[in-house]
């Protein structure tokens, strides 16, 4: 009997597997497969702590694993694992390092992830966050809280309402999430430039053109909106630092839905405090949950999201289950898998 372990009961309610998903996985198991659904709450990101004892026990004889909490410790607890499908879009550096070190050691672990399943929802969030500042909704929220009816702010100065197609958009990380954001801005008339590690792969949908990371500095002075949608690797760590923030035009908007480590947070706060940026839309931070004393919480130029840009309670599960079941069929048939993680690139 071949064995699949499913670990998708997230400790976070928005990411918790609905009952119908578990039932479908059990009902649709290929002949000869046993499915074990573990119940302890799981950390639903790639930087998860140790998995629960029940999960480690279940994985001891498993051939395949589908879920959260993909860590080196978990992989070591499954000596017979041959295929791991992470329910997260990101990949832990510790896991890729471990798998690189043992990629020629039997049994070889084939590693796939859920990149792309969050893209459309996150694209919506990026667009909404930018419009929050473009149309001065931040000013409206503050005035509503204060019971003020004041229209002057919307006619002059950095909070004056502009039309979206006046903004030039730079998307750093033109994969699934970046392309989803780019398509939305493009449809609304914005010129969009994508930045990707391998520009030779072509221009993603929604982008007018694409450049490599080496050309990033040349593009920043023309970017009214910068969207960070790149994976977190050694090459992207603090990609947007103080020097690059200073290259942006006055009143630019910075959006980060990737990882907190892509931005120098102190330099970002300095630019916001100085009034050089119109605003920042931040769904991710270097420390999460965001500490209660963080200046981001009360900053008038910051929109804080609690790492929920990808939350879509129903359609997310339809997409992620479709991807996994397709890969499961491929695994059984010995066909190439989708969403194979590039261990050298780190995503």
Image (cartoon, grey):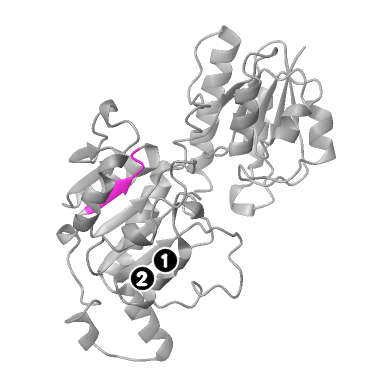
As drawn, 139 above or below 77: below
Seen in the image, is 310 located left or right of residue 14?
left
Question: Residue at the spot x=21%, y=47% of the render?
Answer: 192
Note whether 44 is above or below 23 in the view shown: below
Q: Is residue 231 above or below residue 134?
A: above
Residue sitting nearer the eye, 117 or 167: 167
Q: Which residue is mark 1?
A: 267
Residue 301 in view in this figure: no
Residue 119: percent from left, percent from top? 41, 42
Quadrant location of the N terminus in the rendered image: top right
Residue 171 on the magenta span: yes
- Look at the picture and state if 302 lies above or below 4: below
Q: CB under 8 Å between callouts 2 and 1?
A: yes
Residue at x-position 28% and y-position 37%? 212
- Magenta span: 169-174
> Could you tell me which residue is drawn at 68 percent across and 14 percent down?
105
**SS class of the residue under badge 2?**
helix
Counting from the top left corner in percent of width and height, residue 58 is at 81, 29
Examine the residues drawn in magenta and state their main secondary structure.
strand
User: Between marks 2 and 1, how big is the CA–CA gap?
Assistant: 6 Å
Circle 2: is it few (<14), some (14-19), or many (20+) Cα within 10 Å? some
Q: Is residue 279 left or right of residue 106?
A: left
Query: Which element type, helix, strand or loop, lies under badge 1?
Result: helix
Question: Whole-percent x and y of residue 37?
Answer: 74, 32
Classed neighbour count for the residue bearing mark 1: other residues with Cα under 10 Å, few (<14), some (14–19), many (≥20): some
Image mark for residue 32? none
- Please say whether residue 293 is visible from this viewpoint: yes
29 left or right, relative to 224: right
Disc marking residue 271: 2
**Would you say 237 lies left or right of 213 here?**
right
């Amino acid at each position: 009997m071949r064995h699949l372990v499913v670990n998708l009961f997230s400790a976070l309610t928005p990411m918790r597997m609905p009952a119908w998903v578990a039932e479908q996985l059990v009902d649709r198991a290929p002949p000869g497969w046993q499915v074990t659904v573990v119940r302890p709450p799981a950390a639903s990101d790639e930087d998860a702590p140790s998995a629960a004892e029940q999960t480690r026990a279940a994985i001891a004889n498993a051939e395949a694993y589908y879920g959260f909490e993909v860590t080196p410790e978990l992989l070591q607890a499954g000596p017979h694992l041959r295929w791991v499908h992470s329910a997260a879009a990101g990949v832990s550096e510790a896991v890729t390092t471990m798998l690189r070190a043992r990629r020629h050691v039997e049994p070889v672990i084939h590693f796939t992830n859920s990149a792309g399943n969050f893209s459309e929802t996150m694209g919506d969030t990026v667009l909404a966050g930018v419009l929050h500042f473009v149309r001065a909704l931040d000013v409206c929220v503050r005035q509503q809280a204060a019971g003020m009816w004041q229209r002057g702010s919307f006619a002059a100065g950095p909070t004056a309402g502009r039309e979206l197609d006046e903004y030039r958009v730079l998307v750093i990380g033109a994969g699934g999430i970046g392309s989803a954001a780019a398509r939305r801005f493009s449809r609304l008339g914005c010129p969009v430039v994508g930045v990707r590690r391998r520009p030779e792969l072509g221009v993603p949908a929604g982008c007018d053109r694409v450049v490599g990371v080496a050309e990033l500095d040349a593009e920043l002075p023309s970017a009214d909106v910068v969207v960070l949608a790149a994976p977190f690797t050694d090459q992207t760590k603090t990609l947007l630092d103080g020097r690059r923030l200073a290259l942006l035009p006055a009143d630019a908007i910075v959006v980060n839905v990737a990882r907190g480590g892509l931005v120098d947070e102190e330099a970002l706060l300095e630019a916001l405090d100085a009034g050089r940026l119109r605003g920042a839309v931040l769904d991710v931070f270097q420390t999460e949950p965001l500490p209660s004393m963080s200046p981001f919480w009360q900053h008038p130029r910051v929109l804080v999201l609690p790492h929920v840009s990808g939350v879509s309670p129903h359609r997310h599960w339809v997409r992620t289950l479709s991807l996994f079941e397709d890969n499961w069929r491929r695994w059984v048939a010995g066909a190439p898998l989708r969403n194979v993680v590039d261990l050298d690139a780190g995503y």
